[in-house]
Image (cartoon, grey):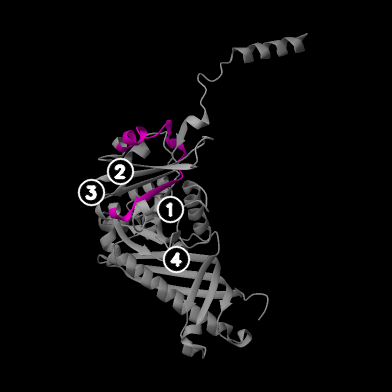
Amino acid sequence: MKKWRGIFLTWAALLCITGCGKTAYIEDQRFIVAEGLDLDDEKKLVMYTASPIFSREAKDKFKITKATAETVREGKKNLEAKLNGKFGPGKLQSMLLGKKLLKETDALIYLDVFFRDPKYEINAYMIVVDGALEDVVHMNMSDKGQIGDVIKSMVESSYKSRISVQTSMQKYHKQMMDSALTPSLTEMRVEKNDLVISGTALLHKDGTYAASLDNQESSLLLLLQRDTSNPIPLTFHLPPEMFHTKEEMSYVSVNIKKGKVEFKTKLEENLLTIDIQMKVQIDLVERMFTLDMAQQSEQLEQAIEQELTKECQDLIKKFQKHQLSPIGVGIHMRAHDYKNWRKVADNWGKALSEAIVNVSTEVAIKNIGVSE
C-alpha cells in the first residue's frame, strides 16, 4: 500500500510541474558564433556577426551581418534590426579584432558589454586579424564549413601544435587587469584565399597593438610561459661550418618534450636583473646534414643550446623594446619578492625594458628516431 501511495504522489507531483511557457523553434533563433570589431576609414566602429541558418528553405548555411555604430550596444541594436529571428549571444565561439582598431584604442572598452551581461559567452577565443577584417568574415567557406567552427578549430589546432597561443575573452580580461602581465592573442590573416594562423599578436598594457610574433617565436613564447603540456616544435639553422655542411642544409628540427623554466629576479639600486634558466629534453625529428650521433651528439646539443639561447634572448629584447610582459616574470617577482615588486609595480614595463636579462639553457637529446 505504501508503495502504491508513493507512486501516486510522484505522478501527482509530475503533473503539477509546468512545462515550457513558450515553444522556441531553432529555425527562429539567430545564434552568433563569431563576431568581429574594427574601425572604418572615419574611425567609426564596424561590427560583423556570423550566425548559422537552420531553415530548410534557405540556400546559405550561415549569414554575415554588418553594422556601424558608436558603441557595441548600439551596434547590437542595429544588428538585431537586420536579423530575422531572436538574437542569441550565448553561443559565441570567436571574437575577431581588427588591427586597425587595436592600433588606435583599447579593445577592452568596446568589450565592456560582454563582461557585464551574463548572457554573453566569455570563453570565446580572441583573435587579432592582420589585414582587413572584412576579408576574413567574407571568406569562401564552401569547402571548409561554417566560419565560426572553422576559426575555432584553427585556433585550437594551432595551440595544440604549439605554434600560437590560445586566449579566451576571460583570460584576455585577466591579462589586462593584472599589472604584471600584458596580453598575447592569436593572430590570423588571409593568404591566397586561405585563412592562416600567422602567429601571436602582443598588446601594450593600455590594450593597443605592440608587435607580432611568427610561429617559431610563438613556440618560444609558450616555452617561456612554461606552457609545455604538449611538445613544442622548433627548427634551428645551425652554423654550417660546425658540421661541415652547406648553408641551405644546416637545419635541425626538434620537439621539446619536457621543459623546466625558472625565473630569478633581483633589484639593486633601482636596476632589475632577471635570470632565466631553462632545462629541456628534446626529440630529434629532422636533421638535414650527415652526422655521427654516436660521436657528435654532445656537439649537436651544444649547438642547439646556443641557438635556443640566442633566439630566446632576441625574443626578450623584442619584449623589452615595447615594454611588454607576456611571460609572467612580474607574477613570479610579486610572489617571491613582494617588497621589491612594490617598488617597480607602477612602472613595471619601464623597469622590464631597462632590466639586465640573462638566459641560460641546458639541452638533452632523449630520442633521435627509429633509424640513424
The residue mark sitting in front, 2 or 3, is 3
Q: Quadrant of residue 327?
A: bottom left
Category of crowding for the residue at label 3, using alpha-carbon neighbours closer than 10 angstroms: few (below 14), some (14–19), many (at least 20) = few
Name the residue at 39% across, 34% down.
83
Query: Which SS class for mark 2?
Result: helix
Q: Is residue 255 left or right of residue 111?
A: right
177 vs 71, nearest the viewer: 71
- Give the Cα separation between the discs numbered 2 and 3: 13 Å
The residue mark sitting in front, 2 or 1, is 1
In the rendering, at what x and y percent does residue 356 appear?
Answer: 32, 71
Q: Amino acid at mark 1?
A: Met
The residue mark sitting in front, 4 or 1, is 1
Q: Quadrant of residue 271?
A: bottom left
* Looking at the image, residue 158 lies above or below residue 311: above
Name the residue at 50% across, 20% down.
22
Which tag, 2 or 3, sits closer to the chain's start?
3
Q: Amino acid at mark 2?
A: Tyr
- Give the Cα separation between the discs numbered 2 and 4: 28 Å
- Give the Cα separation between the discs numbered 2 and 1: 25 Å
Query: Which SS class for mark 4?
Result: helix
Q: Which residue position is annotated with label 4?
A: 215
Task: Tell whether position 171 is magenta.
Answer: no
Q: Which residue position is annotated with label 3?
A: 43
Name the residue at 48% across, 84% down.
248
Task: Tell whether position 99 is magenta.
Answer: yes
Q: How many marks?
A: 4
The residue mark sitting in front, 3 or 4, is 3
- Residue numbers of the magenta segment: 75-100
Q: Which residue position is annotated with label 2?
A: 110
